[in-house]
């Protein structure tokens, strides 16, 4: 029965040569993945995750549904972009205080990668690590999986009550006062701050929270937006409809690997009355806006190349 | 809103009448409507050791303790009014809110709203010093744009997506307007989160299912509260001087999937569109007691901020998460 002997021979070869070889290959692959993981995540990543988990468990669990087992994997993905794709340079992390804090940042880049990168910095680089809490659109709650994912990684529905409660819990809250105006602006307006909302200032005064201005340089160029089509946005009921030619090129859907610079400024302690007139609020907001704009300008001046 | 009322009650001119009212509430007889329900009987068993308890329910009180006086009459009957005329009556606890989705909206309205209006009329006429209404956190309604914790002054939007519960909201509103119109009566509205235990309500029935269906991709945070914690909150509400609206919550919130896992039940995730169509059909064929709009409760958050209850009422849950959840499987003793 030649067929059987042939089969037996294949079996022998498999057992003697192929399997150990595959085993070595597998072991090597695992080792290099481990090495890469240490390079990307740092050697104390697991320890950081455990530390945070213990901190939230001590408080009786996070009432907003943050689950560090899930958040850990999200951070791993973001860490790849933070360390290897954008090679983010982080400055001024020592300015982030321990307790409650409002991080006010410029918003850019068509999709909110900037927020994820700021969050990754706080998780991987800050001592002790922190989880960034940001606010998401209300309609995201109606989407299956998306709503659960956001809540597991610590993002909450964007209503003032939630912001206040997070600050009372002593969390780090990330706010983009420009909102959609900032993130989807065309390439011609890059690094020009759009109009700021005043809600964050009232919140900061009311809860007596320090404001840390954050400037992100490099996110503007990750997707080149040539302009917004108003009629298409209206037809599709989207807030904006950006024209991004690169998405039609193969692999162009990924953001361009620009070099990120994330700069945390010195904390501002704002005094005053939270029920003050809008005009008074705008003055205080303008101060924060100016600070961020000058941090951006400084970053742009120091930048020698878009990609290095 | 209720905070202002507390301040108002503290002005010197009213203090004398406050003292009189406090003396009247302390140890006086309590009328409990809906006493024959599972929660009502639990409350009665605890309350009758401290003060006289009078039951008012259309049903018969099975296994009634000897010292409880029970009247199997309709609230709207004249005999019920006679009852409130008695001078020893110190409080009315209204637990007799009917919520049986199978009965139509009209039936609900006539029973819930008309009966409660009658009761309010008696309380006003005979100057009963205390009124406690057991409303529900469901009056806020599960919505995608809810804050994680809803406070007492939030609008009651529960009927926007689930119109069959508008009578429950109307009831709550009636009690609120009564609160403002009649400062002589201490009105307390309790809005507990999902009550779990031997009670026959939607959340307990849902968790008692052999396989718990969930919505694929949705896993909202939930608040549950043990039935005996609710009973305790009602007893705390009877203390003289307590008035206003109180959200009642149990142990810290938990994700739905984790709650089901703690109970050791398997889950069956179903896409929302399929679940909705399926439940609608089952409902039409009388094969389920869950109306389709109730699916929102396992889709969006509807949690309450119970800080006011902790500070003013002095309430805190005694049961932890595990024992609160396991209460749905407890032996039902009737």
Image (cartoon, coloured by chain):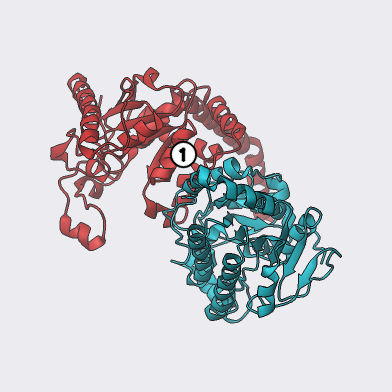
Chain colours: A red, B cyan
Res B210 quadrant in image:
bottom right
Note whether B41 is above or below B261 in the view shown.
below
Give residue A150's position: percent from left, percent from top. Answer: 45, 45
Q: Between B137 and B65, which is closer to the camera in this rendering? A: B65
Instruction: State the residue position of label 1.
Output: A165
Give residue A189's position: percent from left, percent from top. Answer: 14, 38
Give residue A282's position: percent from left, percent from top. Answer: 21, 35
Q: Between B90 and A215, which is closer to the camera in this rendering? A: B90
Secondary structure beneath dot 1 equals helix
Residue ID at (23%, 40%): A182
Instruction: Check the image and name the residue furthest to the right.
Output: B66
> How many C-alpha atoms fall within 10 Å of the one at disc 1: few (<14), some, or many (≥20)?
some
Name the chain letter of the residue that bears numbered label 1: A
State whether residue A64 appears in this view: no
Q: In screen coordinates, is A1 left or right of A171?
A: right
Q: In screen coordinates, is A203 left or right of B29?
A: left
Give residue A201's position: percent from left, percent from top. Answer: 31, 34
Q: Between B10 and B169, which is closer to the camera in this rendering? A: B10
Note whether B34 is above or below A250 in the view shown.
below
State whether residue B77 appears in this view: yes
């Amino acid at each position: 029965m030649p067929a059987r002997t042939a089969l037996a021979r294949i079996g022998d070869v498999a057992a003697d040569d192929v399997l150990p070889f595959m085993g070595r290959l597998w072991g090597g692959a695992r080792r290099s993945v481990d090495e890469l993981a240490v390079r990307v995540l740092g050697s104390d990543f697991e320890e950081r995750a455990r530390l945070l988990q213990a901190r939230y468990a001590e408080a009786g669990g996070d009432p907003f549904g943050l689950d560090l087992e899930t958040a850990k994997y999200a951070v791993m993905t973001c860490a790849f972009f933070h360390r290897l794709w954008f090679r983010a340079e982080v400055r001024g992390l020592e300015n982030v205080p321990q307790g409650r804090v409002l991080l006010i940042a410029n918003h850019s880049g068509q999709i909110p990668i900037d927020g994820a990168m700021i969050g990754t910095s706080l998780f991987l680089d800050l001592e002790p690590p922190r989880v960034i809490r940001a606010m998401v659109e209300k309609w995201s709650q109606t989407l299956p999986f998306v709503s659960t994912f956001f809540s597991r990684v610590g993002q909450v529905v964007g209503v003032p009550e939630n912001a206040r409660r997070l600050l009372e819990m002593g969390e780090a809250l990330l706010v983009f006062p420009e909102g959609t105006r900032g993130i989807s602006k065309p390439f011609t307006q890059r690094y020009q701050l759009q109009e700021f909302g005043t809600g964050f200032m009232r919140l900061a005064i009311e809860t007596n929270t320090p404001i840390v201005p954050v400037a992100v340089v490099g996110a503007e160029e990750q997707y080149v937006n040539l302009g917004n089509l108003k009629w298409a946005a209206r037809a599709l009921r989207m807030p904006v409809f950006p024209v991004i030619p690169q998405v039609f090129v193969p692999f162009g859907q990924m953001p361009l690997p620009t070099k990120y610079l994330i700069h945390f400024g010195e904390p501002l302690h704002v005094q005053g009355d939270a029920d003050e007139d809008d005009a008074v609020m705008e003055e205080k907001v303008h101060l924060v806006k100016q600070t961020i704009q000058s941090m951006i300008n400084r970053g742009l001046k120091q930048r020698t190349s878009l990609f290095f | 809103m209720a905070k202002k009322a507390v301040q108002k009650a503290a002005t010197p001119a009213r203090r004398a009448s406050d003292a009189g009212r406090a003396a009247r509430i302390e140890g006086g007889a309590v009328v409990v409507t809906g006493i024959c329900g599972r929660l009502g009987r639990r409350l009665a068993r605890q309350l009758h050791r401290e003060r006289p308890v009078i039951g008012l329910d259309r049903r018969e009180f099975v296994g009634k303790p000897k010292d409880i006086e029970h009247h199997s009459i309709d609230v709207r009957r004249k005999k019920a009014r006679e009852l409130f005329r008695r001078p020893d009556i110190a409080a009315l606890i209204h637990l007799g809110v009917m919520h049986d989705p199978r009965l139509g909206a009209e039936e609900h309205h006539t029973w819930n709203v008309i009966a409660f209006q009658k009761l309010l009329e008696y309380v006003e006429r005979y100057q009963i010093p205390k009124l406690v209404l057991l409303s529900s956190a469901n009056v806020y309604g599960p919505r995608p744009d809810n804050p994680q914790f809803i406070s007492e002054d939030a609008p009651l939007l529960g009927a926007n997506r689930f119109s069959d519960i508008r009578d429950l909201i109307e009831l709550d509103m009636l009690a609120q307007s009564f609160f403002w119109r009649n400062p002589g009566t201490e009105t307390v509205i309790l809005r507990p989160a999902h009550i779990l235990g031997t009670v026959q309500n939607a959340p307990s029935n849902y968790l008692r299912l052999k396989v718990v269906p969930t919505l694929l991709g949705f896993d909202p945070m939930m608040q549950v509260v043990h039935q005996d914690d609710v009973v305790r909150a009602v007893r705390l509400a009877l203390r003289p001087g307590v008035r206003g609206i109180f959200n009642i919550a149990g142990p810290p919130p938990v994700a739905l999937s984790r709650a089901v896992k703690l109970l050791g039940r398997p889950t069956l995730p179903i896409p929302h569109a399929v679940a909705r169509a399926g439940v609608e059909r089952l409902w039409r064929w009388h094969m389920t007691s869950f109306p389709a709009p109730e699916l929102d409760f396992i889709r969006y958050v509807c949690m309450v901020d119970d800080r006011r209850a902790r500070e003013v009422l002095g309430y805190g849950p005694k049961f932890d998460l595990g024992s609160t959840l396991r209460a749905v499987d407890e032996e039902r003793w009737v």
